[in-house]
């Protein structure tokens, strides 16, 4: 066996050993109390991380300490968002919070919130979520999960080594996007776009192989993108969401009073993460500027570049409608 394979095997064994106690704890009976591990690939100080911490606190209180969430941040088990959803569905994790843009391979409907230039403000994104909540719940139920809440990210923009204002700034730009739709959109502007999770993109950003990143100020602040990409251009791309889910069998086995505790904690978390979004964006902008980031407003982007991105978005959205099916497409 090659040395790299040995290292991979040892890493996998280590992660499995770490995960086993949590998996066992998740199957305690309700009478004993339950400890549920809830994982995200993002740091504790991001939208996903804050949502998990808030949910954990409220669930412990609502359940009289009979239900405990054990948070896991920053892909501690080596799982990215799609893998987290898979692990919850298979019962290897009790719960998780996964970025919707990474879940297109599970169901294209989960890409709805990250569609370009569809819902570009907090109010628009919330209205879209309210319309789509039933669809999301049904699709997660098919995967053996109960949808708890959806947490919004601040508007997605472009982190780069320079401001991105004109078509010439985009040509051959090695750009990380967060879903397959983004690849199509930025290809229309002649960028060299690739769909990567943050875990995958990190080493490429540090080495210079990735020159720009589509992300919010929140995700970027959490990952300290300003160390490598000191410019952020606001383009009003999307206000995407992350989905928090719980393994359906765990929920179904609870007595009614604990089911109600889960539902109350989830509703409180949903309200909190949306109420805090505007304040969070202001804090992110301040933190970015304090760390030397130059923020270029959307008004400084040329009409030519906006037009190229809009044309790319139109084709990407039509493709999404065909892939997601009429039930999802009618939400637009």
Image (spheres, grey):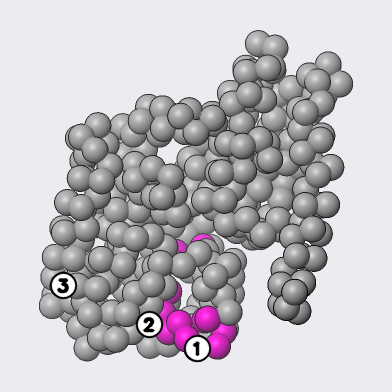
Q: Which residue is mark 1?
A: 208
Residue 94 percent across, percent down from the top left: 68, 36
Quarter of the image for residue 69 reads top right
Q: Nearer the viewer, mark 1 or mark 3?
A: 1
For residue 105, side relative to residue 58 (left or right): left
Q: Which residues are magenta?
A: 204-218
How many marks the image carries: the answer is: 3
Q: Which mark identifies residue 56?
A: none
Query: Which type of secondary structure does the marked residue at label 2 adopt?
Result: strand
Sequence-first disc among 2 and 3: 2
Sequence-first disc among 1 and 2: 2
Image quarter where the N terminus lies is bottom right
Residue at image coords 28%, 79%: 191
Q: CA distance from mark 2 to mark 3?
A: 17 Å
Identify the residue at the far front of this view: 1
Q: Does residue 130 show up?
A: no
Image quarter where the C terminus lies is top left
Q: Residues within 10 Å of mark 2 (few under 14, many from 20)?
A: some
Q: Which residue is mark 2?
A: 174
Q: CA distance from mark 1 to mark 2?
A: 9 Å
Q: Which residue is mark 3?
A: 308
The reply to whether the magenta stretch includes residue 6 is no
């Amino acid at each position: 066996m090659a040395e790299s394979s040995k290292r991979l095997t040892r890493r996998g064994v280590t992660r499995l050993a770490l995960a086993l106690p949590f998996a066992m704890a998740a199957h305690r009976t309700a009478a004993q109390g339950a400890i549920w591990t809830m994982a995200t690939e993002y740091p504790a100080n991001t939208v996903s991380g804050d949502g998990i911490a808030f949910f954990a606190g409220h669930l412990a209180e609502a359940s009289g300490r009979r239900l405990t969430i054990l948070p896991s941040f920053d892909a501690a088990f080596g799982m990215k968002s799609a893998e987290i959803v898979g692990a919850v569905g298979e019962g290897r994790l009790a719960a998780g919070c996964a970025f919707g843009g990474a879940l297109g391979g599970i169901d294209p409907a989960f890409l709805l919130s990250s569609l370009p230039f569809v819902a570009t403000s907090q109010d628009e994104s919330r209205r879209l979520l309210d319309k789509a909540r039933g669809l999301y719940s049904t699709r997660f139920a098919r995967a053996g999960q109960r949808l708890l809440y959806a947490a919004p990210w601040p508007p997605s923009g472009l982190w780069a080594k320079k401001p991105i204002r004109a078509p010439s700034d985009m040509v051959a730009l090695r750009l990380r996007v967060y879903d397959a739709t983004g690849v199509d959109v930025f290809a229309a502007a002649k960028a060299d776009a690739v769909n990567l999770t943050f875990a995958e993109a990190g080493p490429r950003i540090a080495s210079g192989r990735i020159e720009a990143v589509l992300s919010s100020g929140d995700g970027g602040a959490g990952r300290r993108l300003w160390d490598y990409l000191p410019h952020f251009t606001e383009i009003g791309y999307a206000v995407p969401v992350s989905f928090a889910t719980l393994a359906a069998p765990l929920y179904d086995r609870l007595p009614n009073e604990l089911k109600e505790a889960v539902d109350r904690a989830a509703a409180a978390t949903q309200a909190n993460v949306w109420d805090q979004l505007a304040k969070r964006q202001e804090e992110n902008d301040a933190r970015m500027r304090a760390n030397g980031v130059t923020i270029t407003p959307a008004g400084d982007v040329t009409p030519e570049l906006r037009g190229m991105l809009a044309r790319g978005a139109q084709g990407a959205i039509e493709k999404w409608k065909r892939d997601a099916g009429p039930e999802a497409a009618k939400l637009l």
